[in-house]
Image (spheres, rainbow, N blue to C red):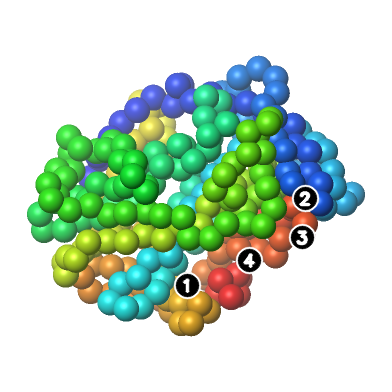
Amino acid sequence: MSRVIARRSPIAFKTQALHVQAGPELLRYTPVGNPLSFDDMLALRQPVQVDDPECFELTVANLGVSADILFTWQQRDFRLLVRQRRPDRGDEVLKLLSGYVPAHELRLPLLTLMTELAEELLLETRHGWLNGRYQEVWLPTPYAENLPPDPNRWYSLSPYQSATRAVICRELNLLERPRAYVHLPTNSLQLVYQMRLTAPPCPDLSALHADESLDQHSGELIARLDPKQPDLYLAELIDGTASGRLFTLERGELVEQQPEHLLLSEAFAPQQGWVIDSSHCSWPDGLR
C-alpha cells in the first residue's frame, strides 16, 4: 500500500523559455521572456522541426535534466531506470531519473538534478534511509521527517563520463559536459549527466522510487512511496552491453521483473546531431 511522504504546492514552480543556438562544436542556451508557470510551459511544448540537426536556432519551452546512473551490486553492473505512465501519450516507459529545471537554476542545472535525485532515488537499509552525496556535497533531505535516515551510512554519486561537445548557458560553460539534445516532439532542451552510484556495504539494501502526482481535489503535488511497487529498476549490463534482464532490489536480493509491453523513453532513442525526434524506443534496443 502506498504511503504519502510529502505534500507541496505546484504554484511555486517557475521556469523560462530558452533560445538555443546549436553548431558543430557547441550548443548555447539563453533564458528568454517572462517567467512561465507549469501550465504555461506545457502549452509551449508543441512539436517543432529543424532543417539541419547539427546547426540551428530556435526557442524551446523548457530545460529538462536527467541522470544516467551506473550502479554496481554484487559485482554486477546495472543502469537505473524508473517507470513512468504517460496518459497523454497512451504509453508507459522506463526512463532516467529526471526533472524540470526552474528559472533560478537554469545556469546551474546540476543543482536541480541533485534535488530530483534526493526526491526520487530512495535507498533503504534496516537502520534507516541513506542520505546522498555528490562528490563532496550533501544532497537535500526532503523526506527526513517521514523517512528516518541511517545515521552512519550514505551513498555517493560521482561523474562517470562526459560528452565530447560543450554546452554553454549564456557565457557559462557547464564543466560536467552533459549530453545535450533538443527533443523535437516536446520542443524541449534536455541535459543528461552520466554518473556512478556507490552504495555502502549493506546486505539488506532496498531501492525505491518516490512517485509524485497532482491531487485533483487539493491541488497539491503529493509524493508517495509503495514498497510493494518499487518502480526503480536495475537494467543489467554485461561488459557494458544490456542483457535484456530487468530487476528490482529488495532487501539485498535482486528480483527479476518481466513487465509487459516495455518501452524506453526518448533519451535512449537514436540522436542525430543535437536532436531526437522520437517519443520512445523499443526495449532493450536503446540500452545497447
The residue closer to the viewer here, 248 or 190, is: 190
Residue carrying label 2: 25
Q: Give the distance between the C-alpha atoms of the residues marked 1 and 2, in whole angstroms.
A: 41 Å
Q: Residue furthest right?
A: 51
Q: Amino acid at mark 3?
A: Gln
Query: Measuring 69% from the left and 53% from the top, which residue is drawn there?
Result: 165
Q: Earlier in the sequence, mark 1 or mark 2?
A: 2
Q: Earlier in the sequence, mark 4 or mark 1?
A: 1
Q: Position of residue 284 (x, y in %)?
A: 55, 74
- Residue carrying label 4: 281
Residue 119: percent from left, percent from top: 34, 42
Label 3: element kind = loop
Q: Is residue 76 left or right of residue 141?
A: right
User: In the drawing, does residue 61 fall left or right of residue 84?
Assistant: right
Mark 4: which secondary structure? strand
**Residue 140 numbered mark, or none:** none
- Which comes sooner in the sequence, label 3 or label 4? 3
| Residue identifier under label 3 | 272
